[in-house]
Image (tube, rainbow, N blue to C red):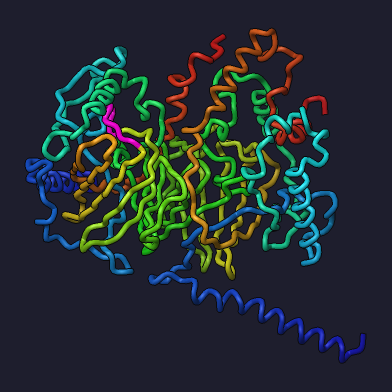
Amino acid sequence: MISKMWQRMVALAVAVATVPLLAAGASAQPGDSTYRAPRTPDGNPDLNGIWQAIGSAHWDIEDHAARMGAAVELGAIGAIPAGLGVVEGGEIPYHPEALATRNDNLDNWLELDPAVKCYMPGIPRATYMPFPFQIVQTPSAIMFGYEYTSSTRAVRMDRPGTEADLASWMGYGLGRWEGETLVVDVTSQMPDTWFDSSGNFHSEELVVEERYTPIGPNALFYEVTIEDPQVFTRPWKMSMPLYRRLEEDARLLEFKCIPFAEEAMFGEWYNRR
Amino acid sequence: MTDRTKKLVATVGIVVLTVLVAIPAIAGQDQKTSWGDPDLRGRWDFRSSTPFQRPERFKDKEFLTAEEVAEYESERAQTREDRIAGVNRDEYTESQNDVDGGYNAFFIDSGVKMSGTMRTSLIVDPPDGQLPAFTDSGIQRARARYATWGQAPATPADRPTAVRCITGFNSGPPITPGAYNNMMEVFQTEDYVAIYTEMVNDHRIIPLDNSEHLPEDMRLWKGDSRGRWDGDTLVVVTKNFNEHTAHQMTSKDMVLTEKFSRTEGGLLYEYTVDDPSSHVAPWSTALEMVATEDLVYEYACHEGNLAMMLMLRGARLQEEAGGGQGTDAQEDQWLASWYRDAAAAVREDK
């Protein structure tokens, strides 16, 4: 009992500590943070842990009021919650024809959203899916294990300047340390992933820069710059805090979602006798 | 043999034994993390041509000599070459194997090298290298599964989990060499060992904190793993599998114990399967993985799984034509060639 109460107090303390960040929204500057993270045995900032974004960016990275969900049967619990956008400046700089594609995606999102099919979400969407992910850090490579569909990537710290041999859903991640910040350049992602469930998309030219900066013992600030000249008129940025899962028994569990997607994907060829 | 010769042989024997014992100790000095645990980090290749069970030709033989290993490997290489060149193509053209094993040589990457253990089988216990007999419930489970897999699938749930891309056929747990994607990468901190497997791009994050396993009602596709160091060996116990776990027809009650130990240039991987509802005795295997600089690539299995749609469409077309599910004439038509011998061995009329 005491331990549960203590956990809640810690959670509350974290929530209070992060209120200024949330209030400042996307304009928060982690550069202002003077926090120095504990070190791993090799001397780098220690980002090991189970982390999770809070919010509704996975539904829509732009400002959005609450809206009706797709399944009538789910009623209110299937509705999409409101959220302030995580896009810096508020607007995604689409080329006009790309904006038309985005709107078309939004109109047909149930049919087109790769997450409905349980496909690997790609970067950055994997970071803010409503599931935890775990960082397991070594000097030469850092593993990101995501609960959502058990997707996995290894960010290579020892292969600067190299290129991927082939495209992948979770991309080719090359990392480096800039002071307290882990910077990851992600290239060679498949063009099939989206940024959210609202049709925001990219092409195979996508280049992502991720920045993970510890801002306290239990929070990272996540900034991501998106570059894709085929779809956007200029690079643009998203940011949000990531919170450490503080439960004493916190574990990355399995969300193997293929069995949940199969009927939606293949149901028309089922034999239902 | 003279007394002098005997003494000499004994002395040489002791020296050899001492060297053998000393090598892992020397190697071990460079194989520690900065915090003092054995260092398992890196990328490991677990391709192996060592048979899972000991074949008849190696009956009563536990280990091979270097020459015998070379001979076996060259046979394997020849078989592979013949397949590429289409030698004896008539023997498998239009066979089940030609349908489900029809990958080209680029795709098949099971390797020709035997495990560095130089054993005649991966199974080391029972000592005869054979899987222990099924229990009655093990046989029932095996029959039911082969029967399901032998019929036209009504839904994806009628196919093995690897065909649905939920779990890999070689990534475990336990890890078993297979036709391709025999690669894994180990990440390690003081608190966790994480295994990233190429097959279905999956991971297993193993806590080393002496914590309890999850409650029994929490069942996972890959089970729930806990690790601890026993000297220089990482011992990982995994349980809480779900009812779909099918490694050698085991049940959800399988308790898997894996051991990872560094060898010179390799990683000795041993596991023991204990599932009294499947086999009459526990059984164990051993395999030496090889360190590699190759990268682990992303195997996006589900994302590229057109085969599931094609199988279901094919099954419906077959039914429309009067065949398929529930018709005697089509029994086992959908059973993959690599299950056929095992399925025949547990058939009711056997």
The reply to whether the magenta stretch includes residue B264 is: no
Of residues A133 and B275, which is closer to you in this image?
A133
Of residues B218 and B9, which is closer to you in this image?
B9
Residue, far bottom: B4
Task: Give the residue at x 11% y 38%.
Answer: A89
Kindly tell me whether residue B210 is visible in this rendering.
no
User: Is A69 on the left or on the right of A155, as rendered?
Assistant: left
- Magenta stretch: helix, strand or loop mostly: loop
- Percent of width and height locating residue B31: 49, 71
- Percent of width and height locating residue B8: 81, 88
Task: Give the residue at x 57% y 32%.
Answer: B163
* Location of the N terminus of chain A (image quadrant): top left
User: Is A253 on the left or on the right of B65, as rendered?
Assistant: left
* Rendered image quadrant of residue A42: bottom left
- Percent of width and height locating residue A6: 19, 48
Q: Is residue B21 above or below residue A228?
A: below
Q: Is residue B92 above or below residue B64?
A: above
Task: Give the residue at x 23% y 52%.
Answer: A211
Task: Give the residue at x 28% y 20%.
Answer: A104
* Location of the C terminus of chain A (image quadrant): top right
User: Is A47 on the left or on the right of B170, as rendered?
Assistant: left
Q: Is residue B347 above or below residue A267?
A: below
* Rendered image quadrant of residue A27: top left
- Percent of width and height locating residue B196: 46, 50
Residue range in magenta is A195-203
Kindly tell me whether residue A221 is visible in this rendering.
yes
Of residues A125 and B124, which is closer to you in this image?
A125
Total marks placed: 0
